[in-house]
Image (spheres, rainbow, N blue to C red):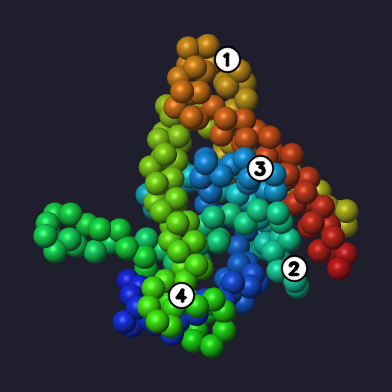
Amino acid sequence: MTNYVLLNQAEHAKLRVITDRSAEYGDAVNFVMTFPFEFRNIQACYPIFFQKDPNTGMVYPVALLGFEQRENLFLTESGWNASYLPLMIKRQPFLIGFQADASDPAKRNAMVSIDIDNPRVNEENGEVLFLEHGGTSEFLQEATQSLELIHQAHQHSEKFVNKLIELELLEAFTLDIKLNNGVENQLMGYYTINEEKLQALTGDILGELSQAGFLQPIFMILASHARIATLVDLKNKSIVA
């Protein structure tokens, strides 16, 4: 369970955050939400697909990290084995919180919140959040910048996905995976770009997608599918090990 509270120096001056990557700290996940602005970096390491929230119906892009629940094939005994760490992983245990504006009750101010029950959070080990004589640490400043990026990226990502849905470019798919030990698996429950419909788009629509900043992310998604082979290779190595 999470327990997010607004971060403040008066109450949390002694808190530290462990930045090691392991299952112990909650990194054993088989996918993580991602955003179009980081697709270029994501596609260099992970396949990009889409998922639909069964409760809200919202569709959002994800980086695939494994084929089974709680399977992160990029986790090793020495940490996270990839050149790029997805922003939604990096931001843990922080989140954007909101507080009512004292001068305007209808307005809410974005604030940094922290999950004080997260196993990364303690008072002995890891990165300090606040300096001894006042002020925030460089680590907390960088975390805040990451949260601001995420906050801004949500709106752009939502517009991106809505446009894909409007153009009927998303389709459900099933991926058959055969491992070296003969075991066959199916990857289901994800969506991807329908390449035939993409190729059939008119020049005007492609131009609109480009102007909106949506065309490059689409190509990054398609390029990322080459990373499925990376996942299969990591899975095969994990079985041998």
Q: Position of residue 105 (x, y in %)?
A: 12, 59
Query: Looking at numbered disc 2 in the image, what kind of residue is underneath it?
Result: Thr
Q: Earlier in the sequence, mark 3 or mark 4?
A: 3
State yes or no: discs 1 and 4 in contact (Cβ < 8 Å): no
Marks 3/4: CA–CA distance: 31 Å
- Determine which residue is flagged by label 4: 129
Element class at badge 1? loop
Return the residue at label 2: 76
Mark 1 closeness class: few <14, some 14–19, many ≥20 residues within 10 Å: few
Is residue 125 depicted above or below 152 in this figure?
Answer: below
For image coordinates 83% across by 57% down, the residue present is 236
- Residue at image coords 33%, 83%: 11
- Residue 235, picture quadrant: bottom right
Local secondary structure at mark 3: loop
Badge 2, how many Cα within 10 Å: few under 14, some, many 20+?
A: few
Of residues 33 and 182, the one drawn nearer to the viewer in this rendering: 33
Query: Is any atom of residue 4 visible in this view?
Result: no
Name the residue type under label 1: Ala
Q: Determine contact: label 3, label 2, CB under 8 Å.
A: no
Q: Which mark is residue 43?
A: 3
Contact between marks 1 and 3 (CB within 8 A): the answer is no
Name the amino acid, label 4.
Answer: Leu
Distance between mark 3 and mark 2 Cα atoms: 20 Å
Q: What residue does disc 1 label? A: 200
